[in-house]
Each structure stands twice: as C-alpha cells, then as structure tokens.
Amino acid sequence: MNKKEMEQKQWNPVWYTIPEFSHIRTQNPYHREQESMRMDVDAPKNVHVLVRSEIWIEEKGGRQYLLDITADDYYKLYVNGHFAGQGPAPAYPEQYYYNIIDITSWLQEGKNVLAVHLYYQGLVNRVWNSGDGRFAMAARLRAGMSQAETLQEEKSRESRIPLVWRYQICHAYSGDTVGYETQFLENFDSRLWKDDWIKPEYQNSGWQEMEPAVWADYCLIPQPVEMLEIYEQKPEVIKRTGKNRWFLDAGKEVTGGLILTASGAAGSRVILTYGEELLHQKETGLECVRWQMRCNCDYREEWILGDGISRYIPYDYKGFRYVQIETEQGVELLDMLIRIQHYPADTKLCSLKTSAPYVADIFHICKRAVILGTQEGYLDCPTREKGQYLGDAVITSRSQVWLTGKTDMLRKCISQFAWTEERCPGLLGVAPGSLMQEIADFSLLWSQLLLTDYQFTGDREFLRQYYPTARRIIAYFAQFEREDGLLDCVSEKWNLVDWPENLRDQYEFPLTRPVVAKGCHNVINALYVGAMKVLSELEKILRYPQTYDWERKRNAFVRAFYKKDRGLFADREQGEHCALHSNLYPLYFGFVPEKAKTSAAEFLIGKGLECGTMTSFYLLKALAKAGYHQEMYRLMVNTGPHGWVNMLREGATACFETWGKDQKWNTSLCHPWSSAPVSILIEDIAGIHLSPEHPDGYEFVPHIPEEVEDFALKVPFRDKVLYVRKQNKMVWLERI
C-alpha cells in the first residue's frame, strides 16, 4: 500500500476509555536517551480491562462483516468465544495502526458478542509507546453487501452496526517487571477470572459503559503488515519428574507461552518456571530449568486455581524452550499446550540441504531466530528488550525478506524510523518504543535499509519517498565535521563500534556512553563516508544529480587512518593499533587502496571472527566483495570459540546474541542480528546476486566451495521460487 492509498484509508473514530484514564493529561511519548524518562502522568501500570459489545443479527444473508479495531497499548479480540486476532503493531500516535478483521465466519443469527481484552503497560521502554496516559480503544463493525447484491454503490450499501462497549477491570494478572523493565511477570489468579466472559451467554449486567476519550489525538492508518500467526502445539517432551512436578521441552526455542488446564481446590498454587536452557543441580544430580535467565529475565510465575476446572491464559509472550511446573497437593494437570506467535512465515519456502559439515544446521538456527524475532516488528530478542533496533534490523530484514519473499515488514520498519526523525534528529537506535536510544553507528546504516528494499523490489517510487530522510541524516552528522570533512566528537549519540565491548578487538580509541572522548576515530567516520557513498548510489538509481563528494571524504579518511607501511587502517589518528573493525568497514565500503586490498583481506582472515555477531555480517560481506569467497566460507564454518559452530556445540536451536553463552554477561539465546549466514549463503555462496536492473532482478554467480559436494537451496524471489543445486561438481539454477 502506497502513501496515497494509506491516506485514503485513514479512519477518524470516536475512541473510548475508562474513567481512570478519561481526565489524564496525556504526555509526549518520546524520550531521548539523554533526557529524563520520568512521566508527569498519574496513571496505573499493568492494567488489564475486559470489554464487551453485544450485537443482534437478524439475518446474515451472505453479507461480509468487517471489524475495524485498534487499541492503545494492545488488544486481543474474541468473537462468540473464538479468538479472532490481536494487535495493533506498536506505533506512534501520529501514525497509529488499526486492523481490519473479517469476522463473518464467527457470527451467528441472533445474539453475538465482541469481547476484547485490553492492556495498558504504563512503562517507558523499547516495546510500546506506553507510560503516556493514553489508554483507549476504537472499533466499528461494517456489514457489506450480500452476494445477491450488485457491485454498484458499494459504499452506500455498506452499513454500520452500532457498538456499545461495557467494561470491567480485570485483577487476575499481577507481577513485577523483568528484562529492562520491558514486561511484567504474569502471575495469574483464576479466582478473579471467568472463562465464559467471551461468550454470548455471559451476563455483563454489572459492567459499566466506556466513555469517550476526549484527548484522543491519533492519526489512524491500516496496519501495513499482516497480523501475527498464532497457533498451539504439544510440547515435544512432557515428563513427570516427581509427585507434583512436571518438565516440558518444546524441542527448540519458541516465542509465546503456556496454556494449561487443571483441576484442584480453589486457592491451590502452581509454580511455572520458563527458561532457554537447563542447569545441573549438584545437590540432587538432576537438571532443572534455568529460569533466572542469562538475558536478565527471571521467568518464574505463580498460578492460583479457582473452583472446578481452571485455565492458565498468558497475555504477553516470552522467549523460552523449557518449562518446569510444580503443583500443590491435589492439583491435577489436565492439558498442557504451548502457544506460539510470530509474524506469518511459511518455513518451507526457503530451505537448504547439504551434507557439508555444519552448513545446514547453521542456516537452520539463523532461520529460526529470524522467524521468532520477527513479531510485529524486527526484535533484537523476544526476551530482554523486545525492541526494534535499527542496526539489528539491517541484518534481520535482509534475512527475513529472503526467507519469506515479502518486503512489507521491511517497509514498515523504514517508515517508522523515518517518522522518528522529527523527534530525534539524525535518527536513533530503536523505534517505535518510547525510549529512543540513540546509537550513531545504527543511524548511519539507515540508508542501507533503503538500498535493501530497492535491491529486492526495483521500486524507485518507494525509494524516492524516503530519500529526503537519508539526506537529513547526513546533514545532522555534518555538524560534527572538522575542516577535512571527518567527524570529530559525535557527542549526542552513542558510538557503539561493536557489542559487546569485549569483542571490539581492543579498539584503541576511548569510548564512553553516550559521549565520546574528543578526537577523531575510525569506525564512526567509515560509517559516515560509507553512508554518503550509499546515498550517492541511491541518487544514481533515482537519476538525481550527484550532490555528495564522498570521494574527497574517503581520501581524508585514508590520510587520517591508513598506515602505508602495514597496508592497514589504524583505530585513531596518530595511533598504531589496527583493530579488525578499523579495517573491515574500509574493505566493505571500498575505501582500501588497490595495492592494499590483499593485505587488508588477509589481515581480516587472520583475525577471524574477533568481533560481535552483528558485525560479522559486514566482515563476511567485505571478504566476498574482495573476492575471498572460499576463505569467507571457511571462516563462517570455523570450529573455534567465535563462530556459529560454537553456538551449535552449545546446543543452539536459534542463533545467540554472541558466539557463546558465556561471552557476554546477559546473553540472549535468540538474537536474529546474528543471522548473517542466511543472506551470505544465498547471495555470496549460492550466488543469487540482487540486481534490479537485470530483467530477472538478479544475476547468478555461484561461489560454492569445492569441498561442498552437494548443495540444494530453495528460496522465494518476487513471484518465483529459485532452486540452486550442486551435484557431481555441476552447479545450476532453476526458476519455477
């Protein structure tokens, strides 16, 4: 959907809230990292509200019933007891989303009920734009034409069914915050919950009517991406480990939660502990779930049973694999299911089979992390922050488009970061959360998102829409230029270089967060000049005049950091230390003098993956650009402590945040920024090189190593499926 179509589908409804929020003076939801995160809003936190609207349908008559619905922060919708969807995807009030849900199949003639479980988190973090006093919902039910009616005068034939919303505050959920105050634990009290509130027969006579939210200031547009795919499955392992203890194993990392059914006396307690890995207890000799997770999430929750049969129903989601359940005497577990959620992804669309050691397994764990980490945005991880970081998104989006063949999530990401520009000049590290963490390195990578979209789609109009934002990012950083055009003391944003800090290869320039020491250092300048080069490439694509003299700044970069005697780049001016990072970006962007390309490439190969997993994407790409495909491949499958093989050795079912569990103090074990092998294997090994100017949209230049005897890659691209195969030393591509 283009910008014009979005504007045509804007919706200006009456929003409804509850008295606790009706007179709150709403606040600006934007919080730059160096500003106070305190809100002058006297509003509750972790609020669950149940709302219902009863409607009568005399005769369905073959009509289609569409529900437009949205909420701030979030909603879950049930129609006559059937789960119908949840949303909206997090967004800013000035560009907020609503969902269009076809509820026809769940409706019946006579009495119907629309039941909505609303949620307001109330925290300032990287998840939702919460903590601002905005809690409300909006909905309208449209009855379209019947099949017997003509297609003429469609709008006049469409009717509105009035909706009157009644509410009740739900006190069944409670708990402290976990992560970086990104989520609440969900202790659940079934005594304070009625399962049948979502059904037509439930009597809500004591519920109060919602009231208009007079402060509602949203600009609504249809959500530009699909709603989440949500499904249930049995755990791979269900094992009773004691009289009142159960152990569940999903078989691999998942994103979601448990749905449990149990019987027992009212007030009986069940303890649930979730984790990504197991711990060996020396005292008992048994393994238990590590619920105090490495990623700074302590997933230990309590469920209190009600009368008769009770159900445990989580609202939010977690990242986990294992669950331990401990019950009090007399509690009988009747059913145990895992509820999984992620952005829709047909896992069969993209696959890789090969007998080459480790390759298929590496591809698989990266693929899984991307699927789980693509929720309603590109997450850094589904546990700790749950935020859409710009730098992460550059890598994750490329993997996700290859895996799904769809660019809608990428475009939403581009749009949301562009929207932050007015609030946070020079862009930022995370959006659309209310904590706008500013990372200079990430902002300078934003134009690469634009290039990725064009490479996959060939769409110049979309590129043209966001080209001005790319220019303004450069203009923002230009204020830090010294006389020769290099950046000096980018003091308003965090100079990351790499993460975690111990994987910066002893980068010599002293860095503090967010202010850097005075002086001029390599990485921020390589990214700055590289961003100008990318922008110049975009100008060529758009047939615009060339406005950036990036070659002059490249020459200044070489003069400042290049050591002729070593054929390498130093970390800082007048410095002698040459870190991996100081040389991979010059090679990636093409700044290395021709005579030094060999020494730079060999230096990087010798260093190996002495960098963070995110940065490995640029390292491997740099080697591929320099023509070192074989060496790049061997680096990717290396068996040392820094590599994806080490993740496999440590039991990974999704790629980690870093190379090993103990290489970072708060490591996430599902982190799609480590998914470089997806695009590397497709583009630089299988040889599907994106080329929008080519009639097919790509060129086929394979670089499958000699030691790989068999190779079978299937990947979606536009409206085709591409097959790259190697067998009996022959390599070919099929297009279906």
Image (tube, helix red, strand yellow):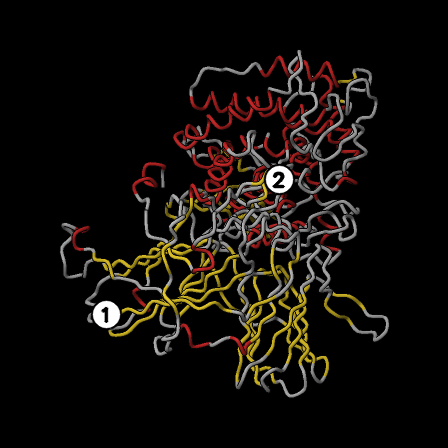
Front position in the image: 182 or 34: 34
Report the disc number at residue 57: 1
Report the disc number at residue 437: 2
Q: Residues within 10 Å of mark 2 (few under 14, many from 20)?
A: many
Q: Residues within 10 Å of mark 1 (few under 14, many from 20)?
A: few
Determine the CA span between mark 1 and mark 2. 49 Å
Q: Residue at x 41, y 57 (%)?
A: 17
Point out residue 656 in the picture as x, y percentages from the top left corner: 68, 51
Rendering quarter of residue 103? bottom left
Rendering quarter of residue 205? bottom left
Front position in the image: 322 or 175: 175
Secondary structure under tag 2 reads loop
Report the disc number at residue 552: none
Quadrant of the frame with the N terminus: top left
Q: Residue at x 35, y 79 (%)?
A: 201
- Amino acid type assigned to the residue bearing label 1 in the image: Ile
Secondary structure under tag 1 reads strand
Number of dots carrying numbers: 2
Rendering quarter of residue 66? bottom left
Tell me if I can see residue 128 in this picture: no
- Amino acid type assigned to the residue bearing label 2 in the image: Gln
Point out residue 355 in the picture as x, y percentages from the top left corner: 65, 53
Point out residue 586 in the picture as x, y percentages from the top left corner: 68, 24
Answer above or below: position of 16 versus 440: below
Q: Residue at x 69, y 36 (%)?
A: 630
Point out residue 644 in the picture as x, y percentages from the top left corner: 71, 48
Front position in the image: 609 or 100: 100
Front position in the image: 374 or 495: 495
